[in-house]
Amino acid sequence: MRVKSSATAPTRIAVPAPARTFGTVQAALGVAAFSLTFPATAWGLEGFGPWSLVAVRSVLAALLAGGCLLALRIPLPVRAHWTGLAVVAAGVVVGFPLLTTLALRTSTTAHAAVVVGLLPLTTALLSALRVGTRPSRTFWAAALAGAAAVVAFTVQQSGGALTTADLYLFAALLVCAAGYTEGGRLARTMPGWQVIAWALVLCLPVSVPAAALALSHEPVHLTAHSVAGLLWVAAGSQFVGLVVWYRGMAAIGIPKASQLQLAQPLLTLVWSVLLLGEHLTVAAPLTAAAVLVCIAVTQRARG
């Protein structure tokens, strides 16, 4: 069902309720996959240098994505899509993994989670500028409240001091939001899994020599943790998670999907306790309750 717009408002296509529900589930699965990224990266850094970890994860993810493209005989994207794919590649495939990995050399996963707390709001802002979305005031109020709650919690956990790691994290926030926004826009005209698959393949001419160079200069100590961390960030975070994430964004819209990520820092903190032995304070369940309320409001508000 197509809803006509006025002369000044953009045309909207009404999405059936089952499709919205399925889109929300897919976006939530993407958030769950992303929540393991920081702990998995910390594991990977136990056996790989930061540059090696990022380059090798990109190569492995690209091989997985390229295999799927070949098996399904997917044709090359049209020329008009390559610029957007380059933005996705620069932000999601290269920029965010590299900057957060460099940050995690000296930062805890709890501290790094602050970037994820700010990511939904930044993505919604870039979406409004790039795609022309205009969420309601209620949506923005809930988004700001949720982001503030997550930021206050994660900053309090880390002591609130700005370090070099923070600069990496804030830069990662911007490039990732740009990649999410462009990927969500492309996922409206081509399958979401193809967006990230082609972005990964596009990086192969850079990631393969980068991996060879990094491995020749950084020591490698293979352990169960380092191998498991590498495999997860390559397959789970870099490919499968982004596939369901972009499909979810295409179904329910970039701003609403991005607000589901308000829960990601808290999930990351849970994994940090279970997998890395980090400790949480009593503030965690209180922040979780506030975030869930904000997510509920943003999902009900008209975007």
Image (spheres, helix red, strand yellow):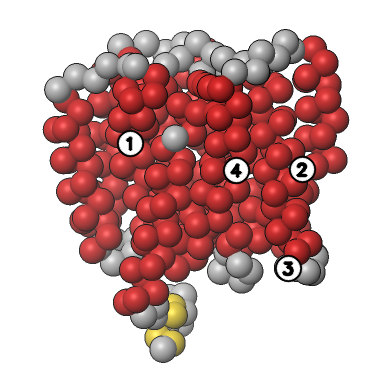
- Check contact, mark 1 vs mark 2: CB within 8 A: no
User: In the picture, residue 73 is in which quadrant?
Assistant: bottom right
Three-letter code, disc 1: Leu
Count of all numbered marks drawn on residues in the image: 4
Q: Is residue 269 left or right of residue 191?
A: left
1 vs 2, front mark:
1
2 vs 4, front mark:
4
| Labels 3 and 4: the sequence-earlier one | 3
Q: CA distance from mark 2 to mark 4?
A: 16 Å
Q: Is residue 217 above or below residue 133?
A: above
Please state which of residues 62 and 135 is positioned toward the viewer in this rendering.
Answer: 62
| Labels 1 and 3: the sequence-earlier one | 3
Identify the mark at residue 29; answer none if there is no mark.
Answer: none
Three-letter code, disc 2: Cys
- Mark 2 packing: few (<14 Cα in 10 Å), some, or many (20+)? some
4 vs 1, front mark:
4
Identify the mark at residue 72; answer none if there is no mark.
Answer: 3
Residue 101 makes an appearance in the image: no
Residue 157 makes an appearance in the image: yes
The residue that label 1 is drawn on is 267
- Mark 3 packing: few (<14 Cα in 10 Å), some, or many (20+)? few
Q: CA distance from mark 1 to mark 2?
A: 29 Å
- Check contact, mark 3 vs mark 4: CB within 8 A: no
Q: CA distance from mark 3 to mark 2?
A: 20 Å
